Amino acid sequence: MKKLCIILLCLQALGCKTSQQESQSTERLIYDHVIFYNGYGKTVDEPVPKHVIRLKNSSYVKKLTEDDLSAISDNLNLQVTLHARCDNYDRLGHVGLNFVKKGAPYTDENVVMTQEIARFISPFMNKNKMPNSVDYLYEINNIGRLLNNKELRATYDFWIQFDLFGTPDAAQKEVPGCEGRGDIYGGSMKLVSSTKNYMNKDEKLIHLYSRDKLDNYKHTDVEGETIKMNEFILEKPLKNARLYVITSNHGANKAGEEYIRREHIVYFDGEELAKYTPGGESCEEFRVVNTQGNGIYGKRPKKLEEWARWNNWCPGNKIPIRIYDLGNLKSGKHQFKMDVPEAEFKDQKGYIPLTVYIQGEE
């Protein structure tokens, strides 16, 4: 044991790196307390942090720098933090990855593709109570591999989009200090990775949907049913392909889709690939960040079976990213299909934001 310690000390003295030194954590702060405003209001002209562009009150973009990209390995986590201001209801938030023509300014014409990569729900939060912030952590190793594709980096700039739609109407009346204010939340975002070296296999992203609305009365590919179908052509085979799916059910009207759990069926190339029913988990661990009284949590803890009867998601939690292995895909035509056969959308209200993409090795 003494000999081993001496050897390690000698290696360190000579500047040799141990395995622990070879892989250190890196953090890149992309957004630092960017302020979201009333989503229904006129876009404000308040100052924004350096290099951040406000698209509207509920949406910002910022380009990843070469330093940001150089700090990313295939071990990548995304941390989103919301800081309470003047919206005390549960709202829907998103993180997107924009592929923009290399060296071009951020304009609609220069955005080649936008892909949602993460989704979250804000809690019922009173800014005057603690805790007054909430974190959402995602493992996005696949995005790390994508951002390290040399061909993609030579063709595109990558801009991270940060969205949170909300309104201060209720908080102006219910939260002391919010009278007359239009700011709803502060938002921070960081990419947490490591410095470890790895052999990056060039991966390609096939965009199918990004926050596309799905229902049975307006946004459907089969009249009267809750179905979306997407036929696409692969020009080249794709190895070790994976399907990424993000869905959440919304519609807060009585008997709305937020309060009834529905089975979702995923098909690929005409075959059933997977079935899942969102929710079914306890929301009690998020009660601590729901500091504003509300009808979802009530005043007493609920048992698992009480939550599981109706909840599709928890205020203050992230929406799952569901991943399905597709194996090796041949070049040519393929088809994705999502079906939610029992969805009703009572009074033609509510919707399911549908995000789907495929990623694999070229």
Image: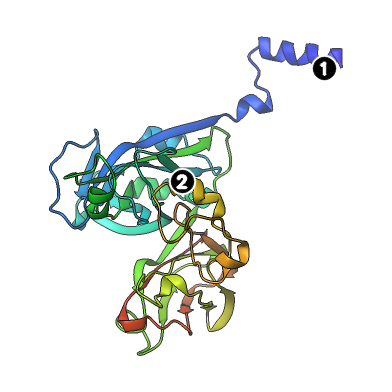
What residue is disc 2 on? 289
Percent across and percent down for residue 143 are 47, 50
Compute the Cα span from label 2 to label 1: 48 Å
> How many numbered callouts?
2
What residue is drawn where x is 58% and y is 43%?
Answer: 199
Percent across and percent down for residue 65 are 34, 36
- Type of amino acid at the residue the image marks with label 1: Leu
What residue is drawn where x is 75% and y is 16%?
Answer: 8
Of 66 and 33, the residue lying toward us: 33
Mark 2–mark 1 contact, CB under 8 Å? no
User: Looking at the image, is 43 positioned above or below residue 195?
Assistant: below
Looking at the image, is mark 2 or mark 1 earlier in the sequence?
1
- Type of amino acid at the residue the image marks with label 2: Val
Percent across and percent down for residue 121 are 41, 55
Is 200 left, or right, of 97 in this rendering? right
Q: Is residue 153 visible?
A: yes
Percent across and percent down for residue 212 are 34, 69
What residue is disc 1 on? 4
Label at residue 67: none
Is label 2 in a helix, a strand or a loop? Answer: helix
